[in-house]
Amino acid sequence: MSIWIVLILLCAIFGGIGYAKGGVRMAVSLFGILLGLALANPLGGAIRPLLASVGLKHPIWNGLLAPMIVFLLVWLVFMGIGFAIHHKLYMRYKYSSDDLSRLKFERMNTRVGIALGLVAAVALLFALGLMVYVLGYATLKVASEESNTGFVKVLSKVREDMRTTGFDRSISSLDRSSPRYYQSIDLFSLLYHNPQLQTRVTNYPPFLRLLEQPEIADAFSDQEYKDMVLGKGSVFQIANHPKTVPILASPTLKDEYSKIDLADFQTYLKTGKAPKFAETQILGRWQFDPFTMVTDMRKKKPDMTSQEIMRARDLLMPLTNATLIATLDNKLVLSSLGAAAAPAAPAAPEDPQATAEAESAAALAARYRTGTPAPQGQARPAAPAQPAKPSVALPMFTGEGAWEGEGSRYKVTLPKVGGGELKGAARIEGDELIVELPEANLTFYRSE
């Protein structure tokens, strides 16, 4: 219904303008409308830097306003040209022709003006329809949320009316938008309606180091901004937030985004698996598993004393949140896997069964996020610091290493704390990455 209302209004307005201006001025003006529509996008890119220099730096509004300004400027120029041509003709018929010829010209001019005005109305209807078709696709995806009101709801309603009237089929043939635009809107809609999937974005292989970008790090260090994004806040509020603008305007992030396969990215968000990188299983973010490492050490050295085991646990427990990132450029980025360089003091004697139960509960909570607390009253009491060092060798790493290989078998190079590096082999078993070193095996599990 809204499409017919807009069409009737445009025909009434421009039919009246054509009657008042006449066919000569309306013909030149119509040519200006068509030329302005044709040049809007090509020339719009040229004036975007000018708009940014005067303060309009938001990429979305800059991109929308620039073509509109080009269209209006071209149209106004041709309106001026039309006025000059009409004035010359009018003066000729007024002073160089008889009254009958002048009256015939004026009558023909008004009638033709009405017809050309209606043509201009239809041209503008298609121009407005194309704008609604492209922008409305985005608003229609998020309009169901109550936080989105006003302009988003109206634009979505008109876009839906285009579909019900079949007008969208006529407009689609004029649409020159990139397929990546519609894929990007689908991705945004998926993340917007399913906030729990947003944690997967930084685990997608091309985005593994995304949080290191200053724009992203700054935005998501703001708890209010995080709550708004994760809480399905208004699209307008999110788009206009001061933290969003640097992200959208960042050349580095634009370049990274332009390189990814959006279809593969969408599959990853939905399933947690990226078909494009399925053969390179090591890619991803891995969480260190200290409990499995202690178990492996005991297998390699069955005669370990209880004090050695406790010292190893004390040394490794602070590293529960350590991560290893295997990136597309064959780098291994280790964080916090060398923080506990100094050995912990030996613990006071304790109940072995209580210790086992407490550490089992902690392992479940750390690995499977069960949130299961350790049994109450079974924590080990603090003991005085001792200068003695543990007799068990524990490899410590930090910084950037390297990997090579494919499938489930790899060769890795890890940087050691204090300098130097250590080479080893790695294998993938299910969701576990096991790095085999002479001193001990490092076990990581995939972070989802």
Image (cartoon, rainbow, N blue to C red):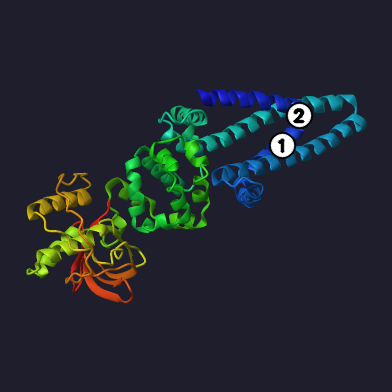
Of residues 27 and 374, the one drawn nearer to the viewer in this rendering: 374
Q: Residues within 10 Å of mark 2 (few under 14, many from 20)?
A: many
Q: Is residue 173 visible?
A: no
State the SS at label 1.
helix
Q: Position of residue 199 (x, y in %)?
A: 34, 47
Query: Residue placed farthest to the right in the image?
Result: 95
- For residue 108, what is the image quadrant? top right
Of residues 281 and 231, the one drawn nearer to the viewer in this rendering: 231
Of residues 2 and 432, the one drawn nearer to the viewer in this rendering: 432
Q: CA distance from mark 1 to mark 2?
A: 10 Å
Q: Residues within 10 Å of mark 1 (few under 14, many from 20)?
A: many
> Residue at (44%, 40%) from the top-left corner?
224
State the SS at label 2.
helix
Q: Amino acid at mark 1?
A: Ser
Q: Is residue 335 visible?
A: yes
- For residue 37, what is the image quadrant? top right
Which residue is denoted by mark 2 in the rendering? 21
Which residue is denoted by mark 1 in the rendering? 29
Q: Is residue 35 left or right of residue 238?
A: right
> Residue at (58%, 37%) from the top-left corner?
127
Q: Is residue 362 above or below residue 384?
A: above
Q: Position of residue 210 (x, y in %)?
A: 40, 56
- CB under 8 Å between discs 1 and 2: yes
Query: Residue placed farthest to the bottom in the image?
Result: 420
Residue 445 marker? none
Q: Amino acid at mark 2?
A: Lys
Q: Is residue 215 left or right of residue 429?
A: right
Of residues 265 and 397, the one drawn nearer to the viewer in this rendering: 397
Q: Which is nearer the N-term, disc 1 or disc 2?
A: 2
